[in-house]
């Protein structure tokens, strides 16, 4: 089940990007006082009261015949079409403007739940000014200050009320995996080679696949899979066409929907900076990952040493994917493609693995005994116990005397000991530090 999608929309320069960044907890969108500075939708994950969701930041909806304004309006409309909930942002300093009314008309047509956020209400004296926004017909206006974080709790409380109910009819027997990568790395060719038919359009023109395409198949041992081919993910500055923006949205949703993500590299072209950006999407989403190096047949004089050198390069450039297994394939010759389903199944099993608390604590205490935590300002970190609280990805809570005493290097040490004991190859694991009361 993919996360609900929240689109943040409104006319230019009302503070959409500032609100987006505040909820995401980091500075993702460009923030500037010049209207229209956010040119492309930006995507991030948010969380409120235990509910995870994806956010889309949009350029301002501006009714103008200027080409740039037309593009911003079109991409915002695509975001609205994909969203489960829409947050419309207005500015108390300007009051209700004609542009606000025009944006509201677009939202009427969407038939989606809309939550109205009145931004820049930085002091109580301005709260009385928000009642003018009832005239937009979008329900109760929520006063907020994106810069200072005032009122965001009430706003998000209302947003999550409109999230769709989770679908409990998901078939747990099917493993869902998707191919991601930059354009023209051969994702569609791998899909066709695995299926033995031209199920997906394949072309030398980068970006042929505009939408995510699902295909179901079963291996001889009876394991069922849903395989998803996605559009190549491009840099935000390269998203020229409205259809490409739509394709990116579909790709992001396919990652959230997947149990396992197959991240495809092009051996012929080597590793590009965009590859790191693409892999980061899946890593940040907490998906299980297998790294697939395609077009290995194009490498001249390849041998085991060549493969080892390329593997070392991947480990160096993608240090945050140290847990992901690597396989070298060729869609053209079908070399090693038969191994992919088994690798996907293994990564899925590790992604959903649960560890008994007693065994986990034995491993943890042995790790602490072998390498006691160093002291900090005369105080020593004390680990009391741990428990697993979630899967997909496996998530562990470790209780201690003071989380501030755990250095990131010691946390990494404990993670490596857990991985060595239980084999979490292919999946990230999350460690949550908690102080024991």
Image (cartoon, rainbow, N blue to C red):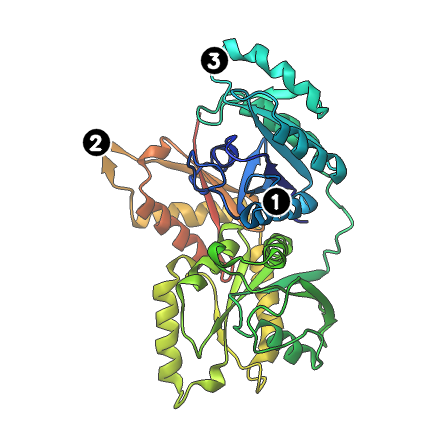
Mark 3 / mark 1, whichever is N-terminal: 1
Q: Residue 123 got which mark?
A: 3
Marker count (numbered) = 3
On the image, the x and y values in percent for residue 54 come to: 59, 43
For the residues bearing labels 3 and 1, Cβ distance under 8 angstroms: no
Residue 108 in which image quadrant: top right
Mark 1 / mark 2, whichever is N-terminal: 1
Point out the frontmost of discs 2 and 3: 3
Q: Residue 73 got which mark?
A: 1
SS type, badge 1: helix
Point out the frontmost of discs 1 and 2: 1
Q: Quadrant of the C terminus?
A: top left
The residue drawn where x is 63% and y is 28% is: 98
- In the picture of the structure, the residue carrying the numbered disc 2 is 377
On the image, the x and y values in percent for residue 345 come to: 62, 66
SS type, badge 3: loop
For the residues bearing labels 2 and 3, Cβ distance under 8 angstroms: no
Mark 2 / mark 3, whichever is N-terminal: 3
Decide which of 216, 246 is in the foreground and name it.
246
On the image, the x and y values in percent for residue 124 come to: 51, 10
Q: In this picture, is 173 found above or below 90? A: below
């Amino acid at each position: 089940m993919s996360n609900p999608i929240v689109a943040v929309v409104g006319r230019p320069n009302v503070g959409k990007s500032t609100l987006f960044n505040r909820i995401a907890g980091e500075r993702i969108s460009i923030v500037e006082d010049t209207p229209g500075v956010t040119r492309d939708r930006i995507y991030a994950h948010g969380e409120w009261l235990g509910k995870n969701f994806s956010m889309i930041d949009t350029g301002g909806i501006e009714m103008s015949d200027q080409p740039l304004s037309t593009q911003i309006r079109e991409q915002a409309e695509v975001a609205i079409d994909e969203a489960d909930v829409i947050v419309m942002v207005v500015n108390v300093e300007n009051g209700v403007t004609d542009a606000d009314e025009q944006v509201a008309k677009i939202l009427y047509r969407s038939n989606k739940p809309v939550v109205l956020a009145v931004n820049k209400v930085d002091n109580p004296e301005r709260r009385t000014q928000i009642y003018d926004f009832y005239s937009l017909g979008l329900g109760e206006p929520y006063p907020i200050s994106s810069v200072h974080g005032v009122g965001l709790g009430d706003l998000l409380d209302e947003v999550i009320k409109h999230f769709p109910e989770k679908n409990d009819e998901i078939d747990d027997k099917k493993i869902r995996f998707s191919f991601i990568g930059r354009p023209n790395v051969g994702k569609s060719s791998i899909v066709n080679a695995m299926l033995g038919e031209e199920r997906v359009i394949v072309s030398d023109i980068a970006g042929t696949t505009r939408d995510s395409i699902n295909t179901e198949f079963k291996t001889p041992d009876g394991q069922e899979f849903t395989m998803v081919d996605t559009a190549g993910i491009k840099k935000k500055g390269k998203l020229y066409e409205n259809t490409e923006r739509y394709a990116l949205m579909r790709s992001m949703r396919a990652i959230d929907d997947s149990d396992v993500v197959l991240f495809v590299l092009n051996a012929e072209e080597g590793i590009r900076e965009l590859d790191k950006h693409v892999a980061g999407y899946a890593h940040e989403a907490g998906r299980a990952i297998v790294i697939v190096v395609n077009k290995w047949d194009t490498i001249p004089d390849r041998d085991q040493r060549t493969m080892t050198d390329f593997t070392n390069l991947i480990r160096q450039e993608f240090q945050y994917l140290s847990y992901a297994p690597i396989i070298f394939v060729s869609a053209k010759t079908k070399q090693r493609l038969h191994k992919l389903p088994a690798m996907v199944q293994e990564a899925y099993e590790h992604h959903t693995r649960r560890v008994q608390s007693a065994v986990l604590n034995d491993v943890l205490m042995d790790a602490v005994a072998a390498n006691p935590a160093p002291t900090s300002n005369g105080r020593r970190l004390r680990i009391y116990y741990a428990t697993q609280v979630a899967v997909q990805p496996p998530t562990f809570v470790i209780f201690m005397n003071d989380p501030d005493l755990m250095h990131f290097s010691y946390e990494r040490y404990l993670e490596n000991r857990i991985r060595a004991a239980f084999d979490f190859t292919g999946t990230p694991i999350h460690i949550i530090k908690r102080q024991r009361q």
